[in-house]
Amino acid sequence: MSTAIKPKHIGRNISRIRELRGMKQEALAFAIGISQQTISNIEGSENVDEEKLNAIAEVLGVSAEAIKNYSDETVLSNIQNNYEGSVINSGPTVNHNCNFNPLDKVIELYERLVQSEKEKVEYLEKLLKEK
């Protein structure tokens, strides 16, 4: 039985990386200066022109080699090995959880801005009274 290796489908790899980045075809097309339909055709192609591949890689924030060698299995393995509490990870764990409430930070920022504006008003009123 022959175990022929399927060639990498570069277009599918581009599509997966784009989706992982949360980018739509339209946004990728706009960033490169081509149509959305062209991106759709590229993602359906097994091979991609090197120049277009390099432009796409730059917009996606990866190397052309990363697109060529992309595999879902590698991504899932990487996530599993780096996830906090993973049994496989024997090294130090990384806490990716927020230890503060982001809304509290927003409220704190607005309170500081309001206080700053109050101080400005007081200063301006003082200047007006002196005249």
Image (tube, helix red, strand yellow):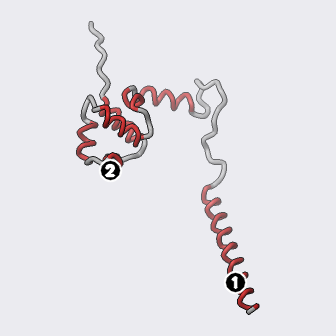
Q: Residue at left 71%, top 90%?
A: 128
Q: Which image quarter: residue 37? A: top left
Instruction: Please report whichever mark, 1 or 2, sits nearer to the chain's N-terminal start.
Output: 2
Q: Residue at left 63%, top 36%?
A: 94
Q: Residue at left 31%, top 37%?
A: 52
Q: Position of residue 87 (x, y in %)?
A: 60, 26
Question: Mark 2 sits on what residue?
Answer: 30
In this picture, is 108 found above or below 81? below
Seen from the viewer's position, the closer of residues 82 and 62 is 62
Q: Amino acid at mark 2?
A: Phe
Quadrant location, the N terminus? top left
In this picture, is 59 found above or below 110? above
Marks 1 and 2: CB-CB under 8 Å?
A: no
16 relative position to 87: left or right = left
Circle 1 residues within 10 Å: few <14, some 14–19, many ≥20: few
Seen from the viewer's position, the closer of residues 3 and 70 is 70
Q: Position of residue 15 (x, y in %)?
A: 33, 38
Q: Position of residue 102 (x, y in %)?
A: 61, 56
User: What element does badge 2 sit on?
Assistant: helix
Circle 2 residues within 10 Å: few <14, some 14–19, many ≥20: few
75 relative position to 126: left or right = left
60 relative position to 7: left or right = right
Q: Residue at left 36%, top 39%?
A: 56
Question: Can you name the residue that lies furthest to the right here?
Answer: 130
Q: Position of residue 4 (x, y in %)?
A: 28, 13
Quadrant location, the C terminus? bottom right
CA gap, disc 1 and disc 2: 48 Å
The disc at residue 51 is: none
User: What element does badge 1 sit on?
Assistant: helix
Q: Amino acid at mark 1?
A: Leu
Question: Mark 1 sits on what residue?
Answer: 124
